[in-house]
Structure formats: C-alpha cells, structure tokens
Image: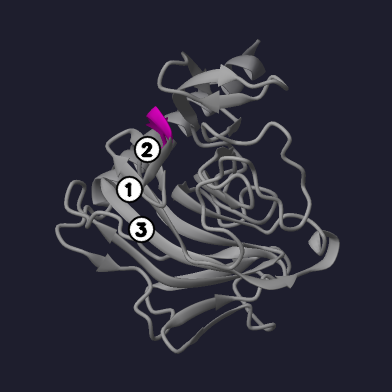
Amino acid sequence: MKNQLLFSLILLFTSTSFCIADEVAKEKAIVPDKVIKIFNGKDLDGLYTWMRDTKYEDPRQIFTVKDGILHISGDGYGGVITKNNYKNYHVIVEYRWGDKTWGARVDKTKDSGLLVHGVGRDGGYGNTWLHSIEAQIIEGGVGDFILVRGTNEDGTHPPMSMDAKVVKDRDGENCWSEEGELKTFHSGRINWYGRDPDWKDVLGFRGRVDVESPGEEWTTLEVICDGDKVTNIVNGIKVNEGTKVVPSYGKILIQTEMAELYVRKWEIWPVGKAPKYTK
C-alpha cells in the first residue's frame, strides 16, 4: 500500500513538473511579428540536424546548401530542425522532389514531411523524430496529418490530441471533410480530403484528384498554426484541418525519409499576414 502511494505521488510530481515546464516553454515560444526566413538560402544557421543512425552528426552530408537551395539527399531517416520554438504562425515551404530514392524505399513513393509543434526528446519517436504534428509530404498524400507520438527525456509521452471532422473512405480510413463527423485523435493519420482510396506505396504514384504538383515540379505547402488550430494548404487549396491541437507550439522540422528533396523557401509569417499563393 505504501509503495503504491509512493508510486502515485511520483507520477503526480512528474506530471506536475512536466506541465509547469511545458507552460514555461510555450510562453517563451516565438510569435513572429514579421517574416522569418527559417532557411536563409546560404547555410543552416538557426537549424540543426538529427539522424536515426548518426544523431547530431551528418557525415554523409545529407543536408547541404547550394545556389540558394536546401538539398536533402534522402539517404537515411531524420530531419533538419529549428533551434527555436514557435507558436501562432503561418509556415510556407516550397519544395520539389529529386530523382533519387534509397534502400528499402527505392521503388516506393517519395516520402518526407513538414513537422510542426515539435517537443520532447530529439529522436523521441523511433529514435528519429520529435513528438509533433506532421503535415505529410508523400506522393499522393501531401497534406495528410500524422500524429507523431514521441517521448520526453525521461521516456514519458507528452500530451497529444487533435479534433478533426472526418468521413470514412471506401477502405474505412479517416479523411478530412468540412461536412464530416467531429472526432478526437491521439495518434494515427487523418488523410487529406481527396486522397485516392486506391493509393499504393509505389514510386511515382499520383491520385485522380491530387493537388500537389506532378513529377519534379515545385509544390507549395502551407501550414497555418493559429492558436490550437492547424490548417494544411497545398498549392493554394485547403486540404486538411485540425482543432484543439496539443501540443500547440514547438520546433519545426523537415524530414529526410529515403527520398531526395529540394527546398527553395522555408519561412514563417504572422497569422493573417502571409502572401497569397501564386503559381
């Protein structure tokens, strides 16, 4: 009985300590009052990298900058991450695929992602990514949400939650819809509204109504983090939205996931101040 009481007190203390630290970090998170160029076009100033196998080192030079472009070779699993925490912002990423794929995904869909509200331990999810909300970048699925559930330094899981209006597709998967049923998610995926039910994990897949640019053309992905609401926009079209999102602040990360990617713009704006999408 005493041991059980002691264990309960430890859990309560740990939870309380985390909540206090979380609120302090959230309070200190940067709210942009003008455009901030996360990628400055010259180097990785303000960013750092984390790889599943080499941690904070990048011996294979997966992340390089040349001629104003961030080149991600795709050779491995990890990402390039902001050093600062942010909240209440509109992030814009302009990217295109390269032609290189790697390893077990050499003949699979080209895959990456823009992760927002990253908190907890670097590599807390699968020794690879932060606990975060992912706006998926994958052939046929750009704009899907994935709730990437990682850990803190002590192995506990930070809170994670998202409400979204969804309908079931032919195969029973959750797809966002303005007319859908409001549900709460603590993990898993919420597909963008037009994801092809015949989607296959094969190189070059393109769905019937996909809105990302075809082939290796440039695509614009925007994620608006307005308080606890997150909205995904692809080439000017709203494709997904979640509310009551937890966490609602944190680092921003672009993945490497065994596919070559080029990024020419990565910046954040105050909510309501970003320029309108133009092709």
Which callout, 3 or 1, points at the residue further toward the start of the chain? Answer: 1
Dot 1 lies on which element? helix
- Kind of residue indicated by mark 3: Ile
- Numbered badge on residue 230: 2
**Of the residues under marks 1 and 2, which one precedes in the sequence?**
1
Q: Is residue 156 above or below residue 203?
A: above
* Marks 3/1: CA–CA distance: 23 Å
- In the rendered view of the protein, which quadrant contains the C terminus? bottom left
Q: Position of residue 117 (x, y in %)?
A: 42, 46
In the foreground, 216 or 15: 216
Verify whether residue 133 appears in magenta: no
Amino acid of disc 2 = Val
Residue 61 spot, x, y in % from top left: 63, 83
Of circles 3 and 2, which is in front? 3
Q: Is residue 167 above or below residue 262?
A: above
Mark 2 element type: strand
| Amino acid type at mark 1 | Ala
Residue drawn at point x = 59 percent, y = 43 percent: 150
Segment tinted magenta in the rendering: 240-247
Image quarter where the N terminus lies is top right
Marked residue nearer the N-terminal end (3 or 2): 3
Q: Which mark is residue 92?
A: 3
Residue at image position (69%, 82%) is 60
